[in-house]
Image (spheres, grey):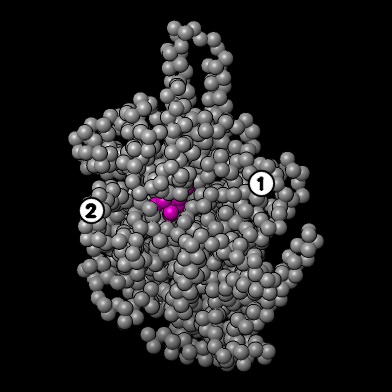
């Protein structure tokens, strides 16, 4: 989780990732930020993110991203 | 709850209808200037019985191309232009049928452009709904009069609407705007024949047989129009004329004889003629009538004094520009 | 039977509402489906076969994808073969998906684009003096094909990704593609957004119907009072492009943008209002786009559903291909995180914008339009860190009103310029018009009355200005997150009714329709 927060802060430090639950739906992270996030996540956690995973629900909060990472790790 | 909503809806609608009805009165014009599409064409219904020698019918290509006052001025034949912008051929037929109750012209000129208008029943349905709404709520028809709204209209309120006879120049749609057509010659011969749709063809046949029954000479003509005309369309009209032994005058093939100058004679880049073009076409048609039809010169006839009066207005209008 | 026609408003819609309410609950969606097909027939007649083909094919292929999965899961897999079998299964599903997408796209390509392709191909043939040319072809386009094809493709991909389950109810799928309020101009809905609500057969509710009607009146206002009145002027300027220059062309671009917004968003208001009456929530397509700060934000707030479609089905899939990912790795290593990322995602961005341009139509001006935004958004992204640095070192507060004003003016210039090319009759005409802004610029055009010679009189301009004030005010209120209809619902009967009566009267009186106006088509229905 720490690692994830670090990556997120690197992308856009002005957001409060611990409480925000509408990162996508609220328009706080745009598609470019998401795209720069993906290679970071893939490298850091050894997962592969595919278009199937590109739904707002997976990126709206830090917890959601964390859950997605775990799910992808198991596969 | 349900009943309450029902009562609310009904009273809202009642209020709305009342309001529309009252508002209609504010916007009904106190004269008939700028009235509907059929205003000019319908003028023929007010002409005295059996006083019209020839009639031109069709769409806007018709109403912009023949000016009966010009023909009157030169030859003394009484004519009426019943062209209605974007008219469907079926409506042309009904208009002709209606006007023949009161008039018995010797010649009918039918402009060909409407032959090629694609037809959909849905459009007819939409038009008829619009006409109905205009009748029920005049505001729908006259809504645009807010532009000319002034207090004189309030004064006129309650008085009977004046039926001012306005001069409509026997149905000709006058325009002196010049917007040149610049793309050069547009007549290229081809063997292609445009296929006239089933529905316009049906009414074309009806118009032909109506004229036959009434012993009227039907003449097809195509007004000069680089934008609307094509050789394939010419071939279609020529074939129809041939089959039915009708005369077909295609003015597009005779631009030089007519002396049409596209730099001056169109009002909209070669779609319609303006006054200067229409004058040339009218001269041509008047000449044609004098050579091929047995019509009488009424210029000295007192019964037709009204025509000379209107001619004066017409000349005033056209010479101003 | 456009949404602003009397036939639709006073005959078609009331009849459908009545039939819907009288029908038994599980028959109601069939009423909507029949109505949608009647609506389609009224525009495109026999071309209904194309829509039916699309419907049947996505129905079949959706189910095929599902059964393929079932077969795979139910079959027993020996552990040593599992990997190979899974790969074979995935390859099969991919083939099925591509078959489905291919079927949808090939219809669209043939009907909409073959004329353009052949025409340009013939130019090449002529240039190399090849003796034979391809036949000139022009197909009649069924109404709404550009919109429903995208919906059909999104359905297939969503089923493939297992975001939704394939629908075995053909009627529901047919209605999802053809629901009549969305047929003409979208918005491009997702299956997950509308399909269920369309078929649940909820009875009409007083609140839904009145809210829907109010929304429709607002749409009619925008369409009839603003868009149709401006039509005359816009046509005059753009259809005789060589006659005008300078301020007149600028006025043309500005007023066309306003016309397009009023026309498209007005139509969408009528669409959403109609949906609301039946209890169906249709996604919004506009969110006060002119209050945006940047071009890319503008496109997240203008024609939202097209942008979202392109993002989900073009941008992300391309960005996440192996090729682009590897490209990203290399370019990040070479150019640093920020620029590297932008360079690699520009591949996907290019795909999005070329398709956005082409989706609107087959003309070089549309391709130019797409590329214009591609370049602008790319530049915007590249410059972002520099702008950040400059503004912070100069201590410019990027939220202060002066800076916001600068951003708005910049955005408006970008948008107006884009729409100038978008509306121009062709690319050359667009270029000439753009040039004539500078070569033919005279301040006197404002004072000598040339603006009044373009088909609109002073009262017309007053009506348009009034419309602008109304649209602007509503925009500001929505920007503050206030729902106007909720507010109105809270007023007392007298105030509420007076407001509605005045609104209706304004539409009727100030609307540009009837004698003296050529009926103006819905602009986006032509795309």
Left or right of C382? Residue B104 is right
Q: Earlier in the sequence, mark 1 or mark 2?
A: 1
How busy is the neighbourhood of tag 2: few (under 14 within 10 Å), some, or many (20 plus)?
Answer: few
Chain identifier of the residue bearing label 2 in the image: C
Give residue C32's mark.
1
* Magenta-tinted stretch: C299-306
Residue at (34, 81) in percent of width and height: C449
In percent of width and height, residue B49 lies at 65, 81
Which quadrant does the N terminus of chain B fall into? bottom right
Q: CA distance from mark 1 to mark 2?
A: 56 Å
**Residue C221 sits above or below residue C363 on the image:** below
**Disc 1 element:** helix
**Near-viewer residue (B68 or B84):** B84
Residue at the disc numbered 2: C389
Left or right of B310? Residue C168 is right
In percent of width and height, residue C275 lies at 61, 52
Whether label 1 touches label 2, CB < 8 Å: no
**Near-viewer residue (C25 or C482):** C482
Residue, far front: A2
């Amino acid at each position: 989780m720490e690692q994830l927060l670090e990556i997120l802060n690197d992308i856009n430090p002005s957001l409060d990732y611990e409480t925000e639950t509408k990162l996508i739906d609220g328009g706080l992270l745009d598609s470019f930020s998401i795209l720069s996030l993906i290679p970071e996540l893939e490298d850091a956690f050894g997962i592969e993110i595919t278009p199937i995973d590109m739904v707002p629900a997976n990126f709206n909060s830090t917890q959601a991203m964390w859950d997605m990472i775990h799910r992808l790790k198991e596969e | 709850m349900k009943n309450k909503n029902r009562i609310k809806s009904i009273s809202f609608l009642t209020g709305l209808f009342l309001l529309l009805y009252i508002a209609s009165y504010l916007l009904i014009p106190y004269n008939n200037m700028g009235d509907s599409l059929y205003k000019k064409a319908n003028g023929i219904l007010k002409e005295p019985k059996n006083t019209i020698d020839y009639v031109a019918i069709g769409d806007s290509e018709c109403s912009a191309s023949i000016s009966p006052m010009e023909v009157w001025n030169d030859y003394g034949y009484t004519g009426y232009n019943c062209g209605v912008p974007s008219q469907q051929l079926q409506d042309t037929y009904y208009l002709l049928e209606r006007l023949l109750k009161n008039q018995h012209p010797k010649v009918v000129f039918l402009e060909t452009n409407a032959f090629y208008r694609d037809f959909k029943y849905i459009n007819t349905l939409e038009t008829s709904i619009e006409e109905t709404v205009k009748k029920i709520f005049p505001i729908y028809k006259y809504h645009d009069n807010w532009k000319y709204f002034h207090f004189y209209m309030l004064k006129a309120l309650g008085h009977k609407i004046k039926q001012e006879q306005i001069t409509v120049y026997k149905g000709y749609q006058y325009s002196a705007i010049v917007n040149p057509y610049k793309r050069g010659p547009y007549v290229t011969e081809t063997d292609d024949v445009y296929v006239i749709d089933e529905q316009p063809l049906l009414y074309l046949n009806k118009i032909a047989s109506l004229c036959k029954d009434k012993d009227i000479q039907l003449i097809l003509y195509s007004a000069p129009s680089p934008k609307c005309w094509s050789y394939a369309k010419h071939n279609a009209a020529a074939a129809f004329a041939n089959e039915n032994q009708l005369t077909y005058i295609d003015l597009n093939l005779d631009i030089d004889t007519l002396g049409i100058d596209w730099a001056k004679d169109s009002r909209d880049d070669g779609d319609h003629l303006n006054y200067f073009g229409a004058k040339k076409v009218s001269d041509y048609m008047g000449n044609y009538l004098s050579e091929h039809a047995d019509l009488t010169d009424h210029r000295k006839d007192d019964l037709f004094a009204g025509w000379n009066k209107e001619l004066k207005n017409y000349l005033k209008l056209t010479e101003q520009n | 039977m456009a949404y602003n026609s009397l036939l639709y408003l006073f005959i078609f819609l009331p009849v459908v509402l009545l039939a819907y309410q009288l029908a038994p609950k599980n028959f109601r969606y069939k009423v909507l489906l029949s109505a949608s097909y009647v609506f389609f027939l009224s525009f495109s007649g026999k071309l209904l076969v194309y829509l039916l083909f699309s419907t049947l094919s996505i129905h079949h292929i959706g189910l095929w994808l599902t059964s393929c999965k079932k077969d795979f899961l139910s079959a027993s897999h020996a552990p040593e073969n599992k990997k190979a079998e899974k790969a074979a299964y995935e390859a099969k599903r991919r083939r099925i998906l591509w078959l489905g997408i291919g079927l949808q796209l090939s219809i669209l390509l043939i009907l909409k684009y073959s004329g353009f392709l052949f025409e340009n191909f013939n130019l090449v043939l002529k240039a190399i003096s090849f003796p034979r040319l391809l036949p000139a072809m022009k197909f009649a386009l069924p109404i709404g094909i550009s919109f429903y094809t995208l919906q059909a493709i999104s359905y297939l991909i969503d089923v493939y990704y297992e975001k939704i389950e394939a629908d075995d109810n053909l009627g529901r799928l047919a209605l999802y593609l053809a629901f009549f309020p969305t047929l003409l101009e979208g918005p491009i809905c997702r299956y997950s957004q509308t399909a269920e609500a369309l078929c649940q057969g909820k009875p009409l509710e007083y609140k839904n119907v009145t809210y829907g009607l109010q929304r429709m009146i607002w749409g009619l206002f925008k369409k009839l009072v603003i868009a149709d009145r401006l039509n005359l002027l816009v046509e005059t300027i753009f259809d005789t492009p060589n006659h005008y220059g300078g301020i007149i062309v600028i006025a043309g671009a500005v007023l066309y943008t306003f016309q397009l917004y009023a026309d498209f968003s007005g139509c969408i208001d009528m669409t959403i209002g109609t949906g609301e009456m039946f209890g169906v929530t249709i996604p919004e397509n506009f969110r006060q786009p002119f209050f945006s700060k940047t071009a890319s934000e503008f496109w997240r707030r203008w024609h939202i559903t097209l942008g979202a479609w392109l993002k989900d089905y073009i941008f992300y899939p391309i960005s996440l291909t192996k090729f682009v990912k590897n490209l990203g790795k290399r370019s990040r290593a070479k150019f640093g995180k920020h620029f590297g990322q932008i360079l690699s995602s520009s591949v996907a961005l290019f795909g999005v914008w070329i398709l956005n341009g082409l989706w609107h139509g087959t003309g070089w001006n549309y391709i130019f339009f797409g590329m214009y935004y591609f370049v602008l958004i790319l530049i915007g992204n590249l410059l972002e860190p520099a702008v950040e640095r400059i503004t912070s070192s100069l201590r410019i507060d990027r939220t202060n009103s002066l800076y916001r004003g600068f951003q708005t003016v910049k955005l408006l210039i970008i948008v107006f310029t884009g729409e100038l090319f978008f509306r121009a009759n062709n690319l050359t005409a667009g270029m000439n018009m753009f040039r004539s802004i500078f070569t033919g610029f005279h301040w006197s055009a404002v004072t000598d009355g040339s603006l009044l010679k373009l088909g609109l009189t002073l009262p017309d301009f007053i009506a348009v200005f009034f419309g602008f004030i109304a649209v602007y005010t509503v925009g500001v209120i929505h920007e503050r997150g206030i729902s106007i209809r909720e507010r109105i619902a809270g007023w007392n009967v007298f105030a509420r009714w007076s407001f509605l009566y005045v609104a209706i009267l304004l539409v009727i009186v100030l609307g540009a329709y009837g004698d003296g106006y050529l009926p103006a088509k819905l602009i986006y229905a032509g795309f």
